[in-house]
């Protein structure tokens, strides 16, 4: 078949970043709980290395050897979750005392999930997306430039340079990033993965059994209005009010490559 160019629906482009999640790593190298990162303005992958070393013999270029490739990235944002601040080298000055921070502490490893949009000339930005799962990251300190409020106000945009230690991939070399294209994978299996990386909502509710000393809002209890359950803001148990406890939801976590393989193949060898 003869090649063609610029056919309708094949004017592809990539744009945008959204739905960023940060996952602190634990001592076992897993990423057991994720936290939504609001205000992300940009994500740039910047791999380095893979430099050529040319070898010559018999008066010709004989071999071309490449050095190891390293993964790097930059993320920019107007704000960041408290959980990322701990990864970025800050700690409470006094344990349990919120609002008083000390910096220049140990920087901790984490993972990221972030979505970039894929568009075309027919569906625009709704055509699809790529999901980037990034492992073994640590963040370099970011510059913070504060200036007076004036007639052209601007919000501070923070920026972090990220470096990675790759994680193991069954049957392949270790990697720092996995990219999943929504246009090409099985939708049901993609949704199963999304339930892992974003978590799931509470699915059933049962009446709580409060005692007078409990704080309903910090317990995460719910109230019911019609058929809708919503988290209560009560700080003390209200007399005669029924509270509910949600169950069945799951925390967001970042699956390691072996589990991603299993998600899409139903078995690692599949």
Image (cartoon, grey):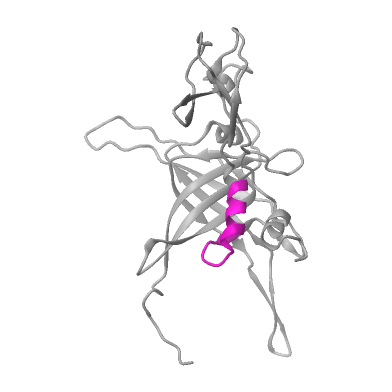
Residue lying farthest to the front in this orientation: 226
On the image, the x and y values in percent for residue 180 come to 58, 60
Counting from the top left corner in percent of width and height, residue 188 is at 59, 58
In the image as oriented, which residue stretches furthest toward the bottom? 2
Nearest to the observer: residue 137 or residue 32: 32
Q: Position of residue 126 (x, y in %)?
A: 40, 60
Answer with left or right where residue 119 lies relative to residue 187. left
On the image, the x and y values in percent for residue 99 come to 52, 20
For the C terminus, give its image quadrant. Answer: bottom right
Q: Is residue 190 left or right of residue 265?
A: left
237 with respect to 247 (left or right):
left
Task: Examine the image and state in which quarter residue 22 appears.
Answer: top right
Please tell me in which quadrant of the rendered image residue 249 appears: top right
- In the image shown, does 17 or 206 lie closer to the viewer? 206
The answer to whether residue 17 is visible is yes
- The answer to whether residue 100 of the structure is visible from this angle is no
In the shown orientation, is residue 123 left or right of residue 206? left
Q: Residue at x 65, y 55 (%)?
A: 176
Q: Is residue 133 magenta?
A: no
Q: Measuring 54% from the left and 56% from the top, which residue is drawn there? A: 131
Tell me how many marks there are.
Answer: 0
Compared to residue 181, the image places residue 4 above or below, namely below
**Residue range of the region highlighted in magenta in the rendering:** 179-196
Q: Is residue 161 above or below residue 7?
A: above
Residue in the foreground of this view, choosing between 202 and 119: 202
Tell me which corner region of the image, top left, top right, bottom left or bottom right, holds residue 3. bottom left
């Amino acid at each position: 078949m003869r090649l063609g160019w610029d056919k309708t629906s094949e004017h592809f482009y990539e744009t945008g970043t959204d739905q960023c999640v940060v996952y602190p790593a634990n001592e076992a190298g897993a990423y057991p709980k994720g936290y939504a990162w609001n205000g992300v303005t940009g994500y740039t992958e910047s791999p380095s290395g893979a430099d050529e070393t040319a070898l010559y013999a018999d008066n010709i270029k004989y071999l071309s050897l490449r050095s190891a490739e390293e993964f790097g990235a930059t993320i920019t944002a107007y704000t960041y979750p408290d959980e990322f601040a701990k990864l970025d080298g800050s700690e409470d000055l006094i344990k349990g005392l919120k609002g008083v921070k000390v910096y220049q502490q140990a920087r901790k490893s984490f993972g990221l999930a972030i979505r970039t949009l894929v568009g075309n000339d027919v569906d625009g930005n709704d055509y699809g997306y790529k999901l980037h799962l990034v492992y073994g990251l640590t963040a370099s300190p970011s510059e913070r430039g504060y200036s007076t409020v004036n007639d052209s106000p601007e919000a501070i945009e923070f920026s972090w340079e990220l470096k990675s230690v790759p994680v193991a991939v069954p049957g392949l070399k270790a990697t720092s990033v996995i990219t999943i294209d929504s246009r090409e994978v099985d939708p049901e299996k993609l949704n199963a993965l999304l339930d892992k990386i974003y978590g799931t909502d509470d699915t059933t509710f049962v009446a709580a059994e409060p005692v007078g000393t409990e704080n309903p809002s910090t317990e995460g209890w719910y109230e019911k209005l019609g058929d809708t359950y919503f988290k209560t803001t009560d700080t003390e148990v209200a007399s005669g009010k029924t509270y509910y406890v949600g169950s069945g939801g799951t925390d967001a976590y970042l699956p390691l490559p072996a589990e991603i393989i299993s998600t899409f193949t139903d078995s690692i060898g599949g």
